[in-house]
Image (spheres, rainbow, N blue to C red):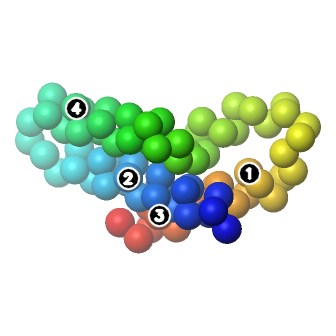
């Protein structure tokens, strides 16, 4: 369950930053905000699917683990 919440917040942070990027006229400031969102994902150890899918060759984690991260990111983005 903790995995789902961490991926939910990661999806929400990136979706919010993307929404701000699309809505702002100053693209430099928007890019800085988007970079800040990705920094927060790394700083707090949140689970972003695009970062975790690179470790799919790691046979220790089951498929449901990647599915939980994907669904959490999707739900977080949809909430924003």
Q: Earlier in the sequence, mark 3 or mark 1?
A: 1
Q: Secondary structure at mark 4?
A: helix
Q: Which residue is mark 1?
A: 66
- Quote the CA–CA distance across marks 3 and 4: 21 Å
- Quote the CA–CA distance across marks 3 and 1: 15 Å
**Residue 71 visible, this orientation:** no
Q: Secondary structure at mark 3?
A: helix
Residue 38 image-quadrant placement: top left
Residue at image coords 44%, 67%: 78
Residue at image coords 31%, 55%: 16
Q: Earlier in the sequence, mark 4 or mark 2?
A: 2
Q: Which residue is mark 3?
A: 76
Q: Position of residue 56 (x, y in %)?
A: 79, 36
- Quote the CA–CA distance across marks 1 and 2: 19 Å
Residue at image coords 39%, 48%: 14
Q: Are marks 2 and 3 in contact (CB under 8 Å)?
A: yes
Q: Position of residue 17 (x, y in %)?
A: 30, 48
Q: Which residue is mark 4?
A: 32
Q: Is residue 67 left or right of residue 35?
A: right
**Residue 23 visible, this orientation:** yes
Q: Which mark is residue 13?
A: 2
Q: Are marks 4 and 1 in contact (CB under 8 Å)?
A: no
Q: Are marks 3 and 1 in contact (CB under 8 Å)?
A: no
């Amino acid at each position: 369950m903790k995995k789902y919440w961490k991926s939910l917040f990661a999806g929400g942070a990136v979706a919010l930053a993307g929404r701000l990027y699309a809505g702002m006229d100053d693209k430099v400031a928007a890019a800085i905000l988007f970079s800040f969102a990705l920094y927060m994902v790394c700083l707090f150890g949140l689970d972003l699917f695009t970062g975790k899918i690179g470790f799919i060759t790691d046979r220790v984690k089951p498929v449901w683990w990647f599915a939980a991260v994907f669904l959490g990111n999707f739900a977080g983005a949809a909430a924003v």
